[in-house]
Amino acid sequence: WGDRYNSFHLRDLPVRLACSKVHPLAEKQALKITDLYGETIIFGKRHTAPYADRIWDFLEQNHPQIQIKEVECIDLPLFNRIVSSNDFVMSADCWRDVHPLLATLPVDWEFTMPYGLIYARNPSREMLQFIMAIGNVIP
């Protein structure tokens, strides 16, 4: 989607998984890959995010016991559907409180996702100044 907007990378975040708080695995402190055998993880559309494709490839090649479901996009209605399903969806700690009925859990993998600001393709001068100011503060 980079042709639709600009972005400013702040840092990389560990990829977590979110599930309903009533899911049998929701109470675990952390998930092992093998905990996910027989489970379904929802991903956004393939070839949209390279970091997601790496996880997808890793699971397909090494853990075929984990089901993968592709959706058009990950949005709030999807989080609402996760609440009443047994599926997992990729998440991050910064989204931990996006839905009060979801649990966000670490997984024993080393995958990360970029985190930052998304802004207009043709930003205003003020927006560029803001981005430059952030760039001067963030190490």
Image (cartoon, rainbow, N blue to C red):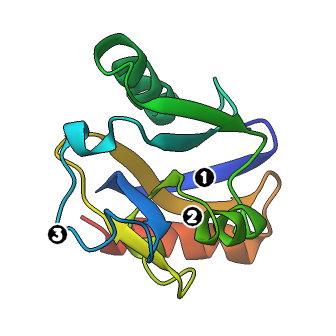
Q: Earlier in the sequence, mark 3 or mark 1?
A: 1
User: Could you tell me if residue 52 is visible in this image?
Assistant: yes
Q: Is residue 65 left or right of residue 120?
A: left
Q: What count of labels does the image hold?
A: 3
3D distance between C-alphas at marks 3 and 1: 33 Å
Q: Earlier in the sequence, mark 3 or mark 2?
A: 3
Mark closer to the observer (3, 2)? 3
Residue at image x 80%, y 51%?
A: 121
Residue at image x 35%, y 65%?
A: 24
Instruction: Name the residue carrying label 2.
Output: 117
User: Could you tell me if residue 49 is visible in this image?
Assistant: no
Instruction: Name the residue carrying label 1.
Output: 7
3D distance between C-alphas at marks 3 and 2: 30 Å
Instruction: Answer with the quarter of the image where residue 36 lies.
Output: top left
Query: Can you give x and y, in whole percent of width and height, for residue 84 in the image?
Result: 64, 69
Q: Amino acid at mark 2?
A: Leu
Q: Earlier in the sequence, mark 1 or mark 2?
A: 1
Query: Can you give x and y, in whole percent of width and height, for residue 63 in the image?
Result: 31, 22
Residue at image x 41%, y 65%?
A: 135
Q: Is residue 29 left or right of residue 49?
A: left
3D distance between C-alphas at marks 1 and 2: 5 Å
Mark closer to the observer (3, 1)? 3
Element class at badge 1: strand
User: In the depicted view, which residue is nearer to us: 129 or 24?
Assistant: 24
Query: Can you give x and y, in whole percent of width and height, for residue 105 in the image?
Result: 30, 64
Element class at badge 3: loop
Residue at image x 40%, y 56%?
A: 17
Q: Is residue 97 left or right of residue 34?
A: right
Q: Amino acid at mark 3?
A: Gln
Instruction: Name the residue carrying label 3.
Output: 29
Answer yes or no: do the residues labelled 1 and 2 have beta carbons within 8 Å? yes
